Amino acid sequence: MKSLKQAAQDYIRMRRHLGFKMRHEERRLRRFVSFMEQEKSPYITTKLALTWATEPADAQRATWAERLMCVRVSRAIAAVRIRARRFLRWHLPFHPQRATPYLYSERKFGG
């Protein structure tokens, strides 16, 4: 079984080969791998994933959601043993809100 670090490097290399720049994603993925190495955990658990994803505590929910996406990618790229039920599917949900369109004029055009 590949290490999470090796799997992450392979994933980044493959995505770049497909034309993705992977600047932010690579940095975030490497930070998560480092976190897992510091924790010395052979498993990605819900508790560890949420601990890492919700740092810093004062960050916006969108940032937390992006960090949690990194954990999901980590799970997918390696044959990592997961110890979590319904792995992080509904944790830290974030749905960007679209701006309300502004109508400059109610005058009809063409008539």
Image: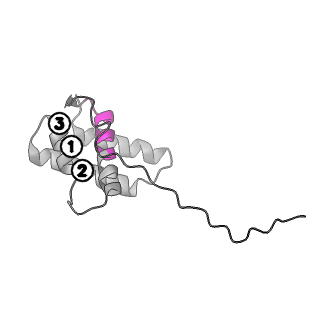
Instruction: Where is residue 13? Give x, y as percent.
Output: 39, 45
How many residues crowd around disc 3 within 10 Å: few (fewer than 14), some, or many (20 or more)?
some
Would you say 92 lies left or right of 83 here?
right
Q: In this figure, which colouring scheme has been used for the structure? A: one colour
Which residue is under mark 3? 45
Given contact means CB atoms under 8 Å apart, are the residues at marks 3 and 1 in contact? yes
Mark 3 and mark 1: span between their CA atoms?
Answer: 6 Å
> Quick one: which residue is furthest to the right in this view?
111
- Residue type at mark 2 is Ala
Which residue is under mark 1? 49
Instruction: Where is residue 50? Give x, y as percent.
Output: 20, 45
Query: Bounds of the magenta span?
Result: 69-79
Residue at screen point 13% across, 45% down? 37
Q: Dot 1 lies on which element?
A: helix
Front-most of residues 87 and 17: 87
Mark 2 and mark 1: span between their CA atoms?
Answer: 6 Å
- Residue type at mark 3 is Thr
- Residue type at mark 1 is Ala
> Split into 4 quadrants, where in the image is the N terminus?
top left
Mark 3 and mark 2: span between their CA atoms?
Answer: 12 Å
Which residue is under mark 2? 53
Q: Quadrant of residue 27?
A: bottom left
